[in-house]
Image (tube, helix red, strand yellow):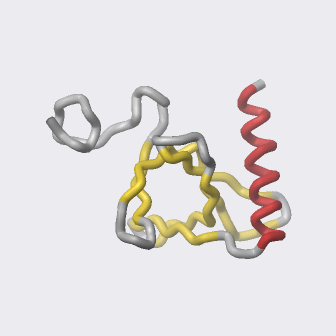
Amino acid sequence: MSDNCGCGCDHEHENEEMGLETMFLTLDDDTELECGVLGVFDVEGIAGKEFIALMPLEDETVLLYEYKEVGDEIELNVIEEDELFDKVSAAFNELFEEEEE
């Protein structure tokens, strides 16, 4: 059986249980964390940047990163400034609340 998806095939695909596309984050200690992609979104007042919300499949913590596509690669950057993180978090919460309604 494949370690990728659990269905016995030899490929990765959407996590059917959650209905989310998944991606792997490589952490500082080189371990990988499989996360569901909740969405890529813009934040009003922050031009030229996109952000991504990820949720590790093992828990319900939401991880927020700056998202950038560079050619065929996806680059995620940690949001280090508290004020920027607060704006991104508020924008995500607003979007998430709208989807639940």
Quadrant of residue 21 within the rendered picture: top left
On the image, the x and y values in percent for residue 100 come to 73, 27
Q: Is residue 45 above or below residue 4?
A: below
At 78% across and 33% down in the image, what residue appears? 98
For the C terminus, the image quarter is: top right
Estimate the x, y position of residue 85 in percent, counting from the top left: 75, 64
Of 60 and 12, nearer the camera is 60
Q: Residue at x 47, y 42 (%)?
A: 58
Residue 51, picture quadrant: bottom right
Residue 25 spot, x, y in % from top left: 43, 60
Measuring 39% from the left and 66% from the top, which residue is drawn there?
Answer: 72
Residue 73, horizontal then vertical, whole percent: 41, 67
Residue drawn 60% across the image and 54% down it: 63
**43 up-or-down from 11: above or below:** below
Looking at the image, is 8 positioned above or below residue 70?
Answer: above
How many tags in the picture? 0
Split into 4 quadrants, where in the image is the N terminus?
A: top left
In the drawing, does residue 1 fall left or right of residue 20?
A: left
Whether residue 73 sits left or right of residue 66 in the image: it is: left
Q: Quadrant of residue 3?
A: top left
